[in-house]
Amino acid sequence: MRFSLLDRSRTRTGPDVTEGDALGHSVERAVAAERLGYGRFWGAEHHGVPGVASGAPAVLLAAVGAATSTIRIGSGGVMLPNHQPFVVAEQFRMLAALHPGRVDLGVGRSVGFTAPVRKALRRGTEEPDTFAEDVAELRSYLDDTGAVTARPAGVGPVPVSVLATGRGLEVAARLGLPVVVGGPVLAEPDAGERLAAYRRSFVPHRGSTPHLTVSLDVLVADTDAEARELALPEVWAMVRSRRTGVFGPLEPVADIRAQDWDAQDTTRVERGLDAVVAGDPQTVRRRFDELVARTGADELLVSGSTHDRDALAASDAEVAALLR
């Protein structure tokens, strides 16, 4: 079982804490992940979100690659509707030239979170869905089968994966690509059939085989209760965003508990915490085993965020120990 780490470059509240610090923290987390034995370190793409500092995964990955030496680095993911496929191919070929044999490219189809962001990205609500065609075009540049050669040439393969929601599983199967699925897909009543259909309808490309990566939020502490408290800042940011439309920085647990919650907040927080794989090592290992048995996952892409960076580092170490 391969295990990898997804970091969203989460910002945090606090005196003298900048959004730039979040990017430095991502690099530090990648260095630790390499030491702990994680197979990959992936960065995310979000635009105009106060709670996330990373809007350009390729730039972040260049810094991560320079600070590490063996761990694979990749994107979870580049949102292809926001970019020209040829430009993405150039960016990731450049990364592959700088860090040979270590670069992966995960692509998704999400666009901006709010209308102003979508406008800034030049993405209208009525534009056609060309995701499948864009992925195929992108791969042609990476395979040297496109009409134009993406430079630098001769850098070796850059594996592509599809971050799947909705029709993404069908696209990945048709193009013979690995797929990454997360909580929303797994929570659907027909999730098992969808995953089985991906494997059943998979069309190999240059000898490829189906590969399912399951992405999930994970936090480990000494007790289940402590782990759920660690998960609270991320869940609270999501709960508040549903009221305000703003996904904000992580706050300390004590500050969150001191705020006034209404019944709806409480219900949403509890549901959010239940969706996180949070607990002591035995609880988390049991949930991992259940998840793999249910999905047949080939790889786990674990993420997790909390305001306390020391507690997060300890959680990453505990997860690595469970999955070795």
Image (cartoon, rainbow, N blue to C red):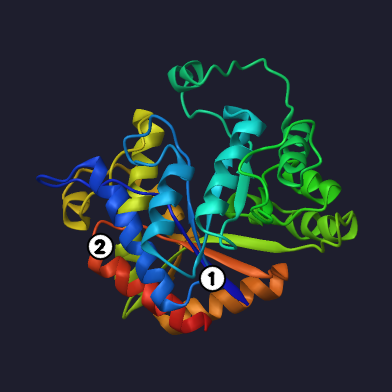
Residue drawn 36% across and 37% down?
247
Query: In the drawing, does residue 237 fall left or right of residue 34?
Result: left
Where is residue 219 drawn, in percent x and y?
Answer: 39, 68
Query: In the drawing, does residue 202 fall left or right of residue 32?
Result: right
Judge whether residue 225 can be spotted in this image.
Answer: no
Viewer-closest of 222 and 93: 93
The disc labelled 2 sits on which kind of residue? Answer: Arg
Secondary structure, mark 2, is helix
* 89 is higher (above) or lower (below) than 228: above
Query: In the drawing, does residue 174 fall left or right of residue 88?
Result: right
Secondary structure, mark 1, is loop
Judge whether residue 120 can be spotted in this image.
Answer: yes
Residue picked out by circle 1: 39
Residue 197's image quarter? Answer: bottom right
* 113 is higher (above) or lower (below) than 287: above
Q: Earlier in the sequence, mark 1 or mark 2?
A: 1
Where is residue 190 drawn, in percent x and y?
Answer: 76, 53
The disc labelled 1 sits on which kind of residue? Answer: Gly
Cα separation, mark 1 vs mark 2, equals 21 Å
Mark 1 or mark 2, whichever is nearer to me: 1
* 39 is higher (above) or lower (below) than 172: below
Residue drawn 10% across and 44% down?
16
Q: Residues within 10 Å of mark 2 (few under 14, many from 20)?
A: few
Residue 211's image quarter? Answer: bottom right
Q: Residues within 10 Å of mark 1 (few under 14, many from 20)?
A: some
Q: Quadrant of the N terminus?
A: bottom right
Where is residue 147 drawn, in percent x and y?
Answer: 79, 31
Viewer-closest of 113 and 236: 113
Residue picked out by circle 2: 309
